[in-house]
Amino acid sequence: MKIISTFILCLLSFNSSFSQNKMNTQPTIDGWYFRAKSGYPASVTFEPLILFKDGTYFEIGKDPIEDLDIIASKKNESHLWGTWKKPQNEFILTDNEGKTNEYDLDNGNWFPAFPFNKSIQLRGVYEKISGGNFGNGLYALFNSQLTFLDNEHFTHSENSGVSSYSSNAWKNSKDSGNYVILGNTIEFEYNDGRKARLSFAIGAEGDNVIDTDMIFIGGKAYVIE
């Protein structure tokens, strides 16, 4: 009986330790932000990030943060991780290669981002455009338009094309379905049965004012038309 009791205590201790270790892999979030980055040749892109209270940051992408395997991500996607500090009014971020950048809420290169809540209504067409001149006469354009029809329904169209001196190729698609947003996660269910679960955030105007003209879906910025 004593042996069984000892075994049970050891098992409970192991489970407690395992649960604690699992919890320790999910650091507490300090806040969501997004920064302006210069692109090629002269464009500006906006990139969402999550700052954790343990002094690390993560460049959030496609997957919701609650679905992220943080240990695996730090190992396989180390370029998306770094450290941050805020000694005064500036946010100082250091990437995994040791390069440091400073951001300030008053300089137009650093903004807070917000989760969705029921008081917010998304309406209209949001657009994401990428592509450009890749040299040697090669041009590419990718256009994604997401229309929020009401609190439940959406349409999604994509247009993409590649043009060169000798040929052109274009592709168009349009889908629709239902959506739901919970905090920093958006879930799409298309009418053909496909489902997508992506990270989500809302942009800001100024230091701390929600601005629904820009939203982030799957780590990409969509701007209202």
Image (tube, rainbow, N blue to C red):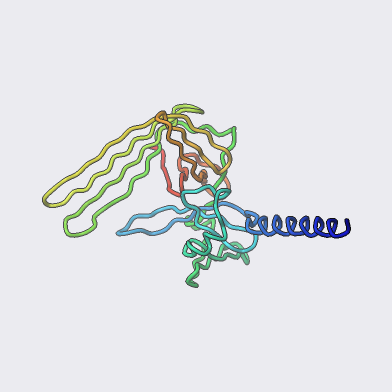
Q: Position of residue 46 (x, y in %)?
A: 43, 52
Q: Could you tell me which residue is drawn at 38 percent across and 34 percent down?
A: 156
Left or right of 88? Residue 216 is left
Instruction: Give the vertical position of 210 relative to 44 (above or below).
Output: above
Q: Could you tell me which residue is drawn at 29 percent across and 51 percent down?
A: 131
Q: Position of residue 184 (x, y in %)?
A: 55, 44
Quadrant assignment, res 129: top left
Quadrant assignment, res 42: bottom left
Residue in the foreground of this view, choosing between 10 and 126: 10
Q: Could you tell me which residue is drawn at 47 percent across and 35 percent down?
A: 188
Outermost residue, right side = 2
Q: Position of residue 79 (x, y in %)?
A: 47, 64
Query: Looking at the figure, which quarter contains the N terminus?
Result: bottom right
Q: Position of residue 108 (x, y in %)?
A: 48, 55
User: In this figure, what is the number of numbered marks?
Assistant: 0
Residue in the foreground of this view, choosing between 32 and 16: 16
Outermost residue, left side = 166
Left or right of 59? Residue 27 is right
Instruction: Give the vertical position of 164 relative to 145 (above or below).
Output: below
Query: Looking at the figure, which quarter contains the C terminus?
Result: top left
Instruction: Give the vertical position of 55 relative to 217 (above or below).
Output: below
Left or right of 173? Residue 91 is right
Q: Could you tell me which residue is drawn at 57 percent across and 64 percent down?
A: 84
